[in-house]
Image (tube, grey):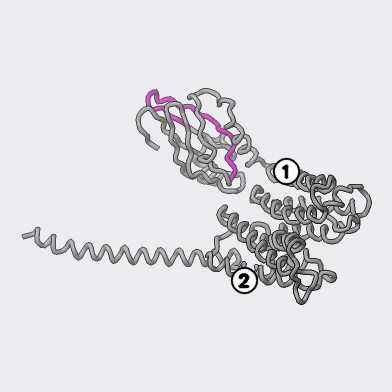
Amino acid sequence: MAVAAKTCTMTVINRHMQPYCLKVSPVLKVDITGWRLARAALSLPPAAARTCSGQMTAASVVLKARTSGSGSYSSKKIGQALSPLVSPSRLGSRSVSAGSPLPRTPAAVPEFLASLALSPYRDYYVVALAAVGGAVWVKVFDLLAANGTLEQKLSRKLVHTTSGPLFVLTWILFSVAPGARYLAAVVPMLNGIRLLAVGNGLVRDQGLVKSVSRSGDRGELLKGPLVYVVTLVAATALSWRDNPAGIIAVSMMCGGDGLADIVGRRWGDAKLPWNKAKSWAGSFAMLVGGYGMSYGLILLFCNLGFFSCYPPAALLSCLGAIALAATIVESLPINQVIDDNVSVPLVAGCLSILLLPQPVEAMAIGVAATEAQVTELAVTATTAAAAAAAVAAPVGLFRSF
């Protein structure tokens, strides 16, 4: 890209050979805008392999700067490519002198994270982070319940409400490797193993028992809490980031069912006529909580490019129907027969598949809409060209005289 005097001409080569706009000051102050690397395999595409030098790797980004004065070249390897979800323009810019090593500033932290993003062990790092983070998160509520800061029931429901969506957010950090979803499923599996060990008395952890059980009986860990983590495993392995059914199922189980119990215990004086154990306040919280959490997570994943974004009207109406159905199921007096952690996400997931367009259908809808827009633009351009020709013809005739 040619720039004004006293600046540098910069060429960025990445593993997809995508053009990027670089603005370089006399001290090589680099601002990179619009950089969104695809979450793809580490091998260079054929076009990039023919263009790049033999020493380059797919995980490298090389800036080649030719100063306008001397004509000499300097190469600087700025580290492995950034995470697909991070834009360098958001990380700020950093100033370096030409030919000098990068200074040790806080800007090195994003570069370190960038090097991890394309590491072949990236998914393993995320699994470790999610597992440790989840254990710490539950331990916080263990301590709060043990010292009496939180009631045992409130602590249990807060763990129930928050753990699922926090785990879903870690999906964003995984790569697009085919086995990434199964590595992600290892995180709730580890929690399930822990519940099995404590519930069967193999490991003593009274804090965990207090934070996730209703009665303080360790055997209760083998019921609702264990079903909870099994549901997370199923949502991860079966749905993942391919379609929103798993996200909706987890949202209805956590944001809906979890919030229903918290609100119902405090403001649930008005009971449901068909189930005196449930209240109108709790059911309303279930409807709003599940609906809101589903919409927020789907919107996030759509904006990050994991799903084809649905038309707002269709998405809101479908989520409303799913949330209403899940709320009705949660209110029924069937908890002794089938746990809410099974019935609610099962109904929500199945309805999501039935009501919401799946990825192929959504893509077809998007392509059809794009083709319609292109056709409309072509017709408009043709009409404008014809009108311009009609106006130009008399003018040309007049000039001929």
The answer to whether residue 243 of the structure is visible from this angle is: no
Dot 1: what SS?
A: helix
User: Residue furthest toward the left?
Assistant: 401
Residue 348 is inside the magenta segment: no
- The Cα–Cα distance between marks 2 and 1, rounded to whole angstroms, is 35 Å
| Residue 155 % position (x, y) | 79, 52
Q: Quadrant of the N terminus?
A: top left
Magenta span: predominant SS is strand
Disc 2, disc 1: CB below 8 Å? no
Q: Quadrant of the C terminus?
A: bottom left
Q: Is residue 98 above or below residue 253?
A: above
Number of numbered labels in the structure image: 2
Instruction: Report the front residue among 400 and 205.
Output: 205
Q: Amino acid at mark 1?
A: Leu
Kindly identify the residue that appears in the image at 40 percent across and 29 percent down: 7
Mark 2 or mark 1, which has the lower sequence index? 1
Dot 2: what SS?
A: helix
Name the residue that disc number 1 marks: 129
Name the residue that disc number 2 marks: 355
